Image (spheres, rainbow, N blue to C red):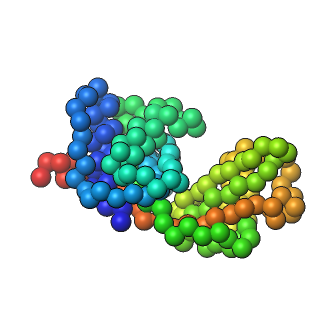
Amino acid sequence: MATEAHCIFCFDVLTSKLDDKTHDISATFAPAKYPLFVTWKLPDEHDQVLRGCIGTFQNVNLATHLKEYSILSAFEDSRFDPIEKHELPHLINCVSLLTNFEKADNYLDWKVGEHGIQITFLDGTEVRNGTFLPEVAVEQEWDNEETIQHLIRKAGYRSKITPKLLNSLQVVRYQSSKKQLTYSEYIKIKQN
């Protein structure tokens, strides 16, 4: 599902944008539709640091939306400053294609490392929602409870997290086909 070609395409889009080039970039992969997320990371001493991650749960055209979300996640993720050209040689791109969506029986009915989760809940009259891709809990070394707590906060909830709130969560679990490519790997491929 997620392939090296998807990551190459995302790097093509980003490098073109950073170089202020306006030429059209053609996809070299087969047409398909999936919910997807595009993630940019930088390496640090022990792991990787998030630089942007934006996606959609809609079943969308890969070529069109990988292009759109490559740009959005690099420059429009409000949690981070826009990616700058000097960061390019160090960047890591991850493409996640989402599959196997199913309603969870309760807020703990999912497996760390296997499932991503999407939550929806009411905060007064406001509907709040959030998601973590399957790798987030593993990377952060969280269990199910910790992941849910962090996701509720990510969704913008600032009050005390009570058993009543936890039991009111609507949880959808899903899986992800993920491919990752470093900029140096991208350059080697482009030179061949």
**Percent x, y of residue 71:** 40, 37
Along the line of sight, which residue is nearer the eye, 96 or 93?
Answer: 96
Q: Which residue is pictured at 29% across the width and 26% down the height?
A: 20
Q: Which residue is pictured at 33% across the width and 38% down the height?
A: 14
The answer to whether 179 appears left or right of 12 in the picture is right
Image height check: is 6 above or below 18? below
Res 83 seen here: yes
The answer to whether 162 appears left or right of 175 in the picture is right
Along the line of sight, which residue is nearer the eye, 126 or 108?
Answer: 126
Image height check: is 160 above or below 174? above
The residue at the far top in this view is: 20
Quadrant of the frame with the N terminus: bottom left
The answer to whether 109 appears left or right of 180 in the picture is right
Q: Quarter-wise, where is residue 29 in the image?
A: bottom left
Badge count: 0
Q: Which residue is pictured at 23% across the width and 36% down the height?
A: 24
Along the line of sight, which residue is nearer the eye, 46 or 42?
Answer: 42
Q: Quarter-wise, where is residue 18 in the image?
A: top left
**Percent x, y of residue 69:** 43, 43
